[in-house]
Image (spheres, rainbow, N blue to C red):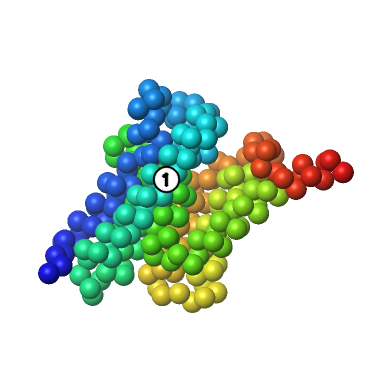
């Protein structure tokens, strides 16, 4: 017989899981806090820039995994009558935990990888679309923050176009809004023309320069 946890416990558990920051946990093993380095953000991009590829991959896997776990917990342990709503609430709670982690002084990352993990469980067909938008934007512009924001917005647009169920629609809109908020400094620097580029990712630009 499948047991169910009290409704309020699930989003709280998802938030606490989301608060387990991949970069900060792995950073403790290495004796570093990447919030004191680079951009000061506890996310995968800053992890890559300051600690290298292997470290960043570990960070991303943890952050994706906790989003997936939070969504799965909602589906698995919520009462059948509210499982869909709770699963989506848990997914967003994990994102909130990632951005404002209780275990790490409420200073975390920007939530993108955790959102991807949740969508892998709740709406897997959307993930290739989001990744395509992210990759194309990054290759064309070299701006990681812009690529992430546009990928998040594409999830909301895709949800509207396909007229997905209300819980999923609200989640995609919430994801888009949160990513815009957490990348507000990046967007401000873009407007000012001071945002840093990931030049190695600008493959089209590099190819055109060689001709």
- Side (left or right) of 47 relative to 118: right
Quadrant in which the C terminus is drawn:
top right
Q: Is residue 89 visible?
A: no
Q: Nearer the viewer, residue 167 or 77?
A: 77
- Side (left or right) of 98 relative to 45: left
- Relative vertical location of residue 22 with respect to residue 151 in this rendering, above or below: above
* Extreme residue in the top direction: 31
Q: Is residue 53 visible?
A: yes
Q: Which residue is mark 1?
A: 61
Q: Can you give x and y, in whole percent of width and height, for residue 193 in the image? A: 69, 39
Q: How many marks?
A: 1
Which residue is drawn at the image coordinates 79% and 44% (left, top)?
A: 207
Q: What secondary structure is found at the residue carrying circle 1?
A: helix
- Side (left or right) of 35 relative to 147: left
Q: Can you give x and y, in whole percent of width and height, for residue 71 in the image? A: 33, 59
Which residue is drawn at the image coordinates 29% and 47% (left, top)?
A: 17
Which residue is drawn at the image coordinates 55% and 50% (left, top)?
A: 148
- Relative vertical location of residue 147 with respect to residue 77 in this rendering, above or below: above
Where residue 92 sits, quadrant-wise, is bottom left
Circle 1: is it few (<14), some (14-19), or many (20+) Cα within 10 Å? some
- Relative vertical location of residue 140 with respect to residue 84 in this rendering, above or below: above
- Side (left or right) of 46 relative to 133: left
Which residue is drawn at the image coordinates 24% and 51% (left, top)?
A: 13
Quadrant in which the N terminus is drawn:
bottom left
Q: Can you give x and y, in whole percent of width and height, for residue 191 in the image? A: 66, 44
Q: Nearer the viewer, residue 118 or 8?
A: 118
Q: Can you give x and y, in whole percent of width and height, for residue 119 in the image? A: 43, 60
* Extreme residue in the right direction: 211
């Amino acid at each position: 017989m499948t047991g169910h946890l009290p409704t309020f416990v699930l989003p709280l558990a998802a938030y606490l899981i989301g608060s387990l920051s991949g970069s900060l946990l792995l950073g403790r093993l290495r004796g570093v806090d990447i919030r004191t380095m680079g951009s000061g953000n506890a996310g995968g991009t800053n992890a890559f820039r300051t600690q290298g590829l292997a470290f960043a991959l570990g960070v991303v896997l943890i952050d994706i995994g906790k989003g997936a776990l939070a969504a799965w917990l909602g589906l698995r342990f919520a009462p059948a009558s509210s499982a869909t709503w709770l699963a989506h609430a848990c997914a967003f709670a994990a994102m909130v935990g990632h951005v404002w982690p209780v275990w790490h002084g409420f200073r975390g990352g920007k939530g993108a990888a955790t959102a991807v993990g949740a969508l892998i469980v709740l709406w897997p067909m959307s993930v290739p679309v989001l990744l395509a938008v992210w990759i194309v934007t990054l290759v064309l512009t070299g701006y990681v923050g812009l690529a992430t924001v546009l990928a998040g917005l594409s999830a909301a647009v895709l949800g509207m176009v396909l007229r997905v169920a209300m819980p999923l629609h609200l989640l995609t809109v919430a994801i888009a809004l949160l990513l815009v908020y957490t990348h507000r400094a990046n967007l401000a620097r873009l407007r000012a023309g001071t945002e840093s580029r990931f030049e190695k990712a600008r493959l089209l630009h590099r190819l055109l320069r060689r001709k």
